[in-house]
Amino acid sequence: MSSCDTCVVRNRAICAGLDSREIHALNAIGRRRSVTAGEPLIWEDDDSLLVANVIDGVLKLTTSTEDGREQIVGVAYPSDFIGRPFGPTSKASVVALTDARVCVFSRNDFDRFAREHPELEHKLLERTLAELDRTRSWMMLLGRKTAPEKIATFLLEMSERLAETGCTPSFGPANRFSLPFSRQQVADVLGLTIETVSRQFTKLKNEGVIELPSRREVEIVNRGALVALAG
Amino acid sequence: MSSCDTCVVRNRAICAGLDSREIHALNAIGRRRSVTAGEPLIWEDDDSLLVANVIDGVLKLTTSTEDGREQIVGVAYPSDFIGRPFGPTSKASVVALTDARVCVFSRNDFDRFAREHPELEHKLLERTLAELDRTRSWMMLLGRKTAPEKIATFLLEMSERLAETGCTPSFGPANRFSLPFSRQQVADVLGLTIETVSRQFTKLKNEGVIELPSRREVEIVNRGALVALAG
DNA sequence: GCTCTTATTTGACTTTCGTCAAGGCTCGGC
DNA sequence: GCCGAGCCTTGACGAAAGTCAAATAAGAGC
């Protein structure tokens, strides 16, 4: 039995739509790998040339300047695809935010397989287009929103994306969730400093918009206010 | 004779790789359209549901907040693909920066055609992946770079992208070029205000890094300095 | 339960960039 | 060549967010 048969993201990842023979072939070139929180999967500039599907956990995609400033340019959740098939490798690191399991492929193997399976390429295309949309709306946030707007937008996005992840069919956005990010990582997503993030969180708490039961936990108390603040 | 036969971007756009029968079929569902500078091709939120290839000219992709702040989230040059095939339409406007010619398709027609032509989907996938890379590196700029760094990076990128456009094989980046952007539009690309852009341009001119022969013309005098400033 | 390490919060101060307000320059039309 | 509308530049000022420094709190390991 191939590990794909028991894969929890089998029907949501790009593998969906492949028949059992194809799945078997794909399984033959891939392997499962666990990554512990904080561990890198791909380094910026490395040419390890691998791509992967996220099975479980959350990973960040980052780019950095030489002097160490970091920007998180993407976040990968279960069923998301990671890496850069075809053409040049992109200059981004992938690091696990939580303990994670991924299904990795050598880029060459994956490229070859994909070229032979249009249905897979189509799934990948749809996913990439959706990711581009999301990335572009994040550009608006980075370029034009104020710190309070950024924080509000971020919390709303989190409440949606973390709700999707669950196995139970989601009933809309979650009002309470555990952030997969530290304060510094939130800052790296939003193009802010850790101090500004902290101050904005505190401000929202004092205004009764959110509760912060622990460092990573967030509870949205007044969603309407958050939506209004998001701009 | 189909208009594709004389198309100047025929070998660079996603149409490349299609055989003459396929090109004929694609030609049948598309039509050429001219857009004058400033004219919109797609409105944010409109469901005109069209996609297009850029033949000639430069167009901007923008998103806006309700209160009128604008962010340019992409720039389309000749041979680039515009629009959102498959799935929901993305909330972005497309407006011509210069007079432009595009080859437009109804989204439904295009989707159907693409699903039947894996080679075209593959080209589109490669293009979308490349665009995602570019967009992500722009996120780093928006989130983490200072105004001087943004301006320097912008000028270097312009000198590269505008060089590619020419018919003659490009000999590296152009040192003198005509910006397809007004100052306000440069500000909208970089997440700055028009005043800050103007001040930074003036500063670079005073430092002898660039020359500004006219409003839209830029000459890079000291590329090394610009690279150093870009961070 | 205690201690140590590390993340987070908070405060005071600085810097950068945005805002507001003139003024000047271009370029297209005559 | 002259005129005028719209862009662009410049200056003075203010506000938002960054920096630096210290205090506090939360977990991890014992």
Image (tube, coloured by chain):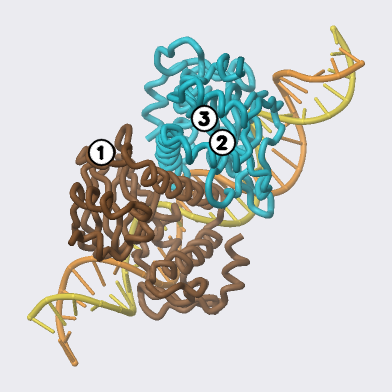
Chain colours: A cyan, B brown, C yellow, D orange
Chain identity of mark 3: A
Can residue A94 be seen by looking at this rendering?
yes
Chain identifier of the residue bearing label 1 in the image: B
Assess disc 3: are there few (<14), some (14-19) or many (≥20) residues with their C-alpha within 10 Å of its C-alpha: many
Taking depth in this image into account, of A5 and B101 the one nearest to the observer is A5
Q: What separation in Å lies between label 2 and label 3 (alpha carbons)?
A: 7 Å
| Amino acid found under the numbered disc labelled 1 | Asp
How far is disc 3 from disc 1 in space, using C-alphas? 26 Å
* In the foreground, A193 or B225: B225
Dot 2 and dot 3 within a common chain: yes
Residue C10: percent from left, percent from top: 64, 31
Q: Quadrant of the C terminus of chain A?
A: top left
Where residue B85 sits in the image (x, y, percent)?
31, 39
Crowding at mark 2 (Cα within 10 Å: few <14, some 14-19, many 20+): many
Q: Quadrant of the N terminus of chain A?
A: top right
Element under label 2?
Answer: strand
Question: Which residue is label 3 attached to?
Answer: A80
Q: Nearer the viewer, residue B223 or B50?
A: B50
> From the viewer's perspective, is residue C8 above or below residue A167?
below
In percent of width and height, residue A227 lies at 38, 27
Gap between marks 2 and 1, in whole Å?
29 Å
Residue under the point 37% across and 72% down: B167
Q: Are marks 3 and 1 on the same chain?
A: no
Horizontal and vertical percent for residue A205?
A: 53, 22
Q: Amino acid at mark 2?
A: Ile
Nearer the observer: mark 3 or 1; the answer is 3
Q: Mark 2 touching mark 3, by CB under 8 A? A: yes
Residue type for callout 3: Asp
The residue indicated by pointer 1 is B45
Q: Which residue is mark 2?
A: A82
